[in-house]
Image: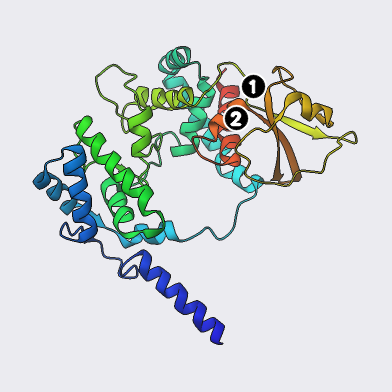
């Protein structure tokens, strides 16, 4: 009983430290006189030449939303298996929507693919997984999300404080009203779900209209996704992944499912160990054997360099495989 009381008390104190009055779900305006906010404003004025009065007005118009803290603090009930995860994204409805999207924007997508070296199916796969081709982009104001997490979420305050800096910088650079952009509760923006720092580093004006618009302009969305991959080392035309078979000749232990984000072996070393898989890559190319729990038991895949480039967009093996497979499934419908 004593331990249960301690645990309950600790849980209560943690919840209070992460958000003041999380259970009182009414949003409250940002208090620009609050020390943590005032210090942030001082920094933006001193280091980034923001006008103090204008910034106070903008931040004072933002809202601290306990519902955002509740969403980001509540862990998933359990980790999904690959079989369960795949069923969320590789559906007939999403494939059909992707095929329609590809056909409607074929010329633009093919132009961006030629210019960047990133395949159309990869661009389309990312957009399909991220926002269902623009259908699900998030309805929270980005300013509210980032202000809430920067000022009232200690576990990741440093990260979100920097993203708030980046967001305010990009709204000034792009001449965007800071109160207008919407996105996820974590501040991911627009159709490709870029965080503000990613927007500033990788978003491009692929339409040539002088703006980087990832909320409404499909050329800018596709071009920005492609540029993200280029800047993280995408190799045009190279294999992404290959299904593997571990037969009787496999000499190593059976790998367990884990979120491996880097290739530590080579094509040759995996084959020498008895893994059977197809690839056009040379024997000395980096590769990694991956294990995932599918509907019918363990699935083995080999991830190559481009596979791990995808994990830079979202640090998840299952995400990378889902985006790749969705793009391939859509390509099979269109091509």
Please state if 34 lies on the left or on the right of 157 as rendered.
left
Could you tell me how far apart the alpha carbons at marks 1 and 2 are, in whole angstroms? 8 Å
Quadrant of the image containing the N terminus: bottom right
Q: Is residue 242 above or below residue 50?
A: above
Under circle 1, the secondary element is loop
Please state if 223 lies on the left or on the right of 243 as rendered.
left
Q: Residue furthest left?
A: 53
Q: Is residue 148 above or below residue 254?
A: below
The percent coordinates of residue 297 (x first, y second) are 76, 46
Q: In the figure, residue 302 lies in which quadrant?
A: top right
Please state if 191 lies on the left or on the right of 247 as rendered.
left
Question: Which residue in the structure is indicated by mark 1?
Answer: 239
- Identified at 73% across, 47% down, the residue is 256
Q: In the figure, residue 18 lies in which quadrant?
A: bottom left
Dots 1 and 2: beta carbons under 8 Å?
A: no
Label tally: 2
Within-10-Å neighbours for mark 2: few <14, some 14–19, many 20+ = many
The percent coordinates of residue 126 (x first, y second) are 49, 32
- Identified at 16% across, 56% down, the residue is 32
The percent coordinates of residue 44 (x first, y second) are 20, 43
Quadrant of the image containing the C terminus: top right
Residue 203 appears anywhere in the view: yes
Question: Which residue in the structure is indicated by mark 2?
Answer: 307
């Amino acid at each position: 009983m004593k331990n249960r009381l301690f645990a309950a008390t600790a849980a209560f104190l943690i919840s209070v430290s992460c958000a003041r009055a999380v259970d009182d779900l009414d949003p409250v305006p940002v208090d620009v006189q609050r020390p943590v906010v005032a210090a942030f404003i001082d920094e933006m004025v001193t280091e980034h030449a923001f006008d103090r009065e204008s910034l106070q007005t903008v931040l004072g118009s933002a809202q601290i939303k306990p519902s955002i803290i509740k969403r980001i603090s509540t862990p998933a009930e359990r980790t999904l298996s690959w079989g369960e995860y795949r069923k969320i994204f590789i559906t007939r409805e999403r494939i059909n929507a992707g095929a329609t999207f590809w056909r409607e924007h074929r010329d633009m997508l093919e132009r961006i693919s030629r210019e960047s070296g990133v395949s159309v199916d990869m661009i389309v796969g990312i957009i399909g997984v991220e926002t269902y081709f623009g259908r699900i982009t998030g309805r929270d104001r980005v300013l509210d999300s980032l202000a809430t997490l920067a000022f009232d979420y200690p576990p990741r305050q440093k990260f979100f404080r920097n993203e708030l800096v980046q967001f305010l910088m990009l709204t000034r650079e792009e001449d965007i009203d800071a109160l207008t952009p919407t996105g996820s509760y974590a501040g991911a923006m627009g159709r490709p779900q870029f965080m503000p720092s990613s927007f500033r580093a990788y978003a491009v004006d692929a339409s040539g209209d002088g703006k980087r618009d990832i909320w409404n302009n499909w050329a800018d969305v596709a071009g920005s996704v492609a540029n993200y991959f280029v800047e993280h080392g995408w190799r045009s035309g190279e294999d992404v992944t290959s299904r593997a078979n571990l037969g009787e000749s496999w000499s190593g232990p059976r790998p367990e499912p884990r979120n491996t984000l880097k290739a530590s072996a080579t094509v040759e070393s995996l084959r020498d160990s008895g893994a059977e898989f197809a690839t056009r890559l040379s024997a000395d190319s980096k590769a990694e054997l991956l294990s995932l729990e599918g509907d019918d038991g363990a699935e083995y895949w080999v991830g190559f360099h481009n596979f791990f480039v995808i994990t830079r967009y979202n640090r998840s093996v299952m995400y990378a495989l889902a985006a790749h497979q969705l793009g391939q499934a859509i390509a099979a419908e269109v091509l």
